[in-house]
Image (spheres, rainbow, N blue to C red):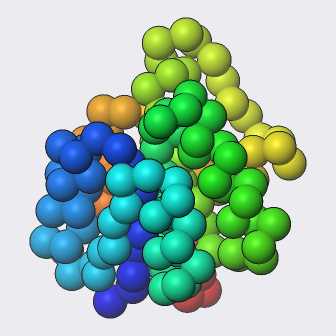
Amino acid sequence: MALIAIIDDDPDILEAIETVLTAKGYDVVTAKNIRDGEKIVLGTNPGLVILDVMMEEPDDGFFLAQKLRRKNFKNPIILLTSVSKTIGFDYGESELLPVNKFLEKPISPEDLLKTVEEFFQNRRQ
């Protein structure tokens, strides 16, 4: 099954997403900060990255997504955020935000799996 990298500083979120994905047969690697996240992504080339927006710094997820793209990581990146709901901000699409999708926290296991499966199905087509 496909490899997914999850990068989030919240151990509960990290464990919950990992549990949902491994229960469906996905292989998962995890990191709790952007330094380790960059290493696992570049070292394992996962088919998908699920990345928290706010970690040690409020823009860590944006920073890491841009850095991965500059290093030629082409696979999909999903950013998890609770910021847009809190402040009413719509990220939209932008070259400054080189991600494929934003998902609002908290996300249900069903919605997470649906999104992940859509990305992998689209890559197979």
How many marks are shown on the rendered structure?
A: 0
Q: Residue furthest top?
A: 87
- Where is the N terminus found, in terms of image quarters? bottom left
Residue drawn at x 66%, y 55% is 65
- In depth, the one of 46 and 40 nearer the eye is 40
User: Residue 87 falls in which quadrant of the image?
Assistant: top right
- In depth, the one of 68 and 93 nearer the eye is 68
Residue 77 is situated, as x and y percent measured from the top left of the image, at 58, 60
Q: Is residue 118 visible?
A: no
User: Residue 71 falls in which quadrant of the image?
Assistant: bottom right
Q: Residue furthest right?
A: 95
Residue drawn at x 38%, y 48% is 8
Side of 31 where 39 appears, left or right? right
Residue 114 is situated, as x and y percent measured from the top left of the image, at 36, 59
In the displayed structure, 125 sits above or below 12; it is below
Residue 118 is situated, as x and y percent measured from the top left of the image, at 47, 67
Residue 42 is situated, as x and y percent measured from the top left of the image, at 59, 79
Side of 70 where 76 appears, left or right? left
In the displayed structure, 100 sits above or below 89; it is below
Side of 111 where 123 appears, left or right? right
Residue drawn at x 63%, y 17% is 89
In the displayed structure, 32 sits above or below 74; it is above
- Where is the C terminus found, in terms of image quarters? bottom right
Q: Is residue 57 visible?
A: yes
